Image: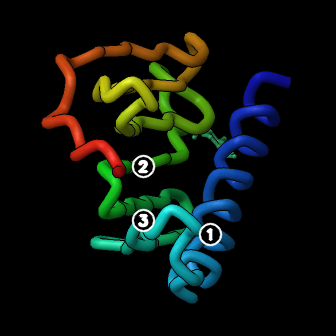
Amino acid sequence: MMKITLFALAALAVALAQEDAPAAAAAPAPAAGGAAPVQILKQVDEVDVDKYNFEFETSDGTSRQETGEYKNDTEQQGLVVKGSYKYVAPDGQQISVTYLADKNGYQPTEEKAADQAAPAPEA
Ligand SMILES: *[C@@H]1O[C@H](CO)[C@@H](O)[C@H](O)[C@H]1NC(C)=O
């Protein structure tokens, strides 16, 4: 059951990463406040029979990276997923989470860095 759940999560993550791309790339009209649209700075998608890797980074300080690999040895049978994501919270704090998901479950490590250089307040 755990393995099925991990596979489902991984598949969903890959699907979401791929779905997000065209919409974001279509550069929506600037928001009413005049904020610049968020740009995709980096995007990587690699899918193989027994492993995958995806990565993206956007101009608003958000990034996400994940690799998954199917293992079938004495140590581990099933998917091993390693990844991380970062974003700037509304209060300006940089949130960074690194995680491992394997036979021992989802194991996140969160770091909260000091405020980013605060964006200039809008007039
Ligand atoms: C995992 O490895 C065992 C032992 O080599 C093999 O019998 C089994 O078919 C493998 N399972 C998968 C899903 O590859």
Q: In the structure shown, which secondary structural element does the residue marked by tag 3 occupy?
A: loop
The image shows residue 115 at horizontal and vertical percentages of 21, 23
Q: Is residue 45 visible?
A: yes
Q: Nearer the viewer, residue 84 or 63?
A: 63
Q: Nearer the viewer, residue 94 or 86?
A: 94
Which of the two marks, 1 or 2, is nearer to us in this view? Answer: 1
- The amino acid sitting under disc 3 is Ala
> Residue at 35% of width from left, 50% of height from top?
122
Residue 63 position (above or below residue 116): below
Tell me the quarter of the image containing the N terminus: top right
> Residue at 43% of width from left, 47% of height from top?
66
The image shows residue 29 at horizontal and vertical percentages of 57, 83
Which of the two marks, 2 or 3, is nearer to us in this view? Answer: 3
Mark linked to residue 20: 1
Q: Which residue is mark 2?
A: 67
Q: Which residue is mark 3?
A: 35
Q: Is residue 117 left or right of residue 8?
A: left
Q: CA distance from mark 1 to mark 2?
A: 18 Å
